[in-house]
Amino acid sequence: MAGKHDAGWGPAAGVESVKRYLEAQSFAVLCVGMDLGQGTEPVLIVKSSRDLLDSLRAAGAQPEVAWMVHRTDLGPVVCLVVRTQAEGVGSLAGETYFDPAGEGDRELIGSMTSRTRLRVVFLDEDMELEWVAEIPWDEVRRLETEQVIDRAEELMESAKSYDFSKAKENFQDSVPLDQLLARAFPQ
């Protein structure tokens, strides 16, 4: 199952605005900065149906993520692709976008270079917490994240003009989710 591509939310996003956004969506993937008791950290929020989430959790599914940096004529597109799947259940997949020119999004990505885990929070259609998973964020992941930052900066410098919304729209129109997943999680 996949849904509409959703935008990322940096640490400056207010809790109420994120909550209102999520309540209005049947499916969403967001990365937000949240303070869970040890300072602000990036948290990946996935909203889907209770039935699918319960089935995935019962099957022992573990989320996996992959970075994607893509060049468009209107500047770079940076997204974090998430997929959770289990045999006999199916899969849940989507992505969240980061504006490489946006201070909040740059801070959020930058904070991932010093983390040891990425928490993934799964919410059902009633905004109830279904489960929380942790993805280890080891040295390789931190280096990969630094490379994403560097590549996005390089593409920003070479872009003739930059428009985050139009670049994201161009990317979504030209790269369907199945192709995005194939690039993010090659067999």
Image (spheres, helix red, strand yellow):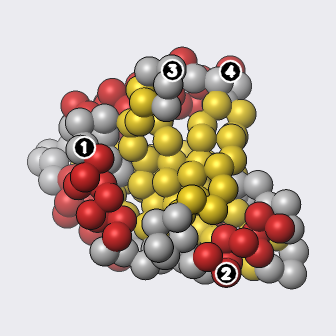
**Disc 2/disc 4 C-alpha distance (Å):** 35 Å
Find residue 51 and name its label: 2
In the image, 130 versus 93, the foreground residue is 130
Instruction: Name which residue type carries label 3.
Output: Gln
Number of the front mark, 1 or 4: 1
Circles 3 and 1: CB atoms closer than 8 Å:
no
Q: Position of residue 14 (x, y in %)?
A: 23, 44
Please tell me how crowded label 3 is: few (under 14), some (14-19), or many (20+) other residues with Cα within 10 Å: few
Instruction: Name which residue type carries label 1.
Output: Ala
**Disc 1/disc 4 C-alpha distance (Å):** 28 Å
Q: Earlier in the sequence, mark 4 or mark 3?
A: 3
Instruction: Name which residue type carries label 4.
Output: Glu
68 up-or-down from 137: above or below: below
Circles 1 and 4: CB atoms closer than 8 Å:
no
Circles 2 and 4: CB atoms closer than 8 Å:
no
Q: Which residue is mark 3?
A: 38
Q: Which residue is mark 4?
A: 139
**Disc 3/disc 2 C-alpha distance (Å):** 32 Å
Q: Is residue 186 visible?
A: yes
Q: Earlier in the sequence, mark 2 or mark 4?
A: 2
Number of the front mark, 2 or 4: 2
160 up-or-down from 143: above or below: below
Q: SS for tag 4?
A: helix
**Disc 2/disc 1 C-alpha distance (Å):** 29 Å
Please tell me how crowded label 4 is: few (under 14), some (14-19), or many (20+) other residues with Cα within 10 Å: few
Q: Which residue is at 51% across, 48% downward?
A: 44
Instruction: Name which residue type carries label 2.
Output: Asp
Q: Earlier in the sequence, mark 3 or mark 1?
A: 1
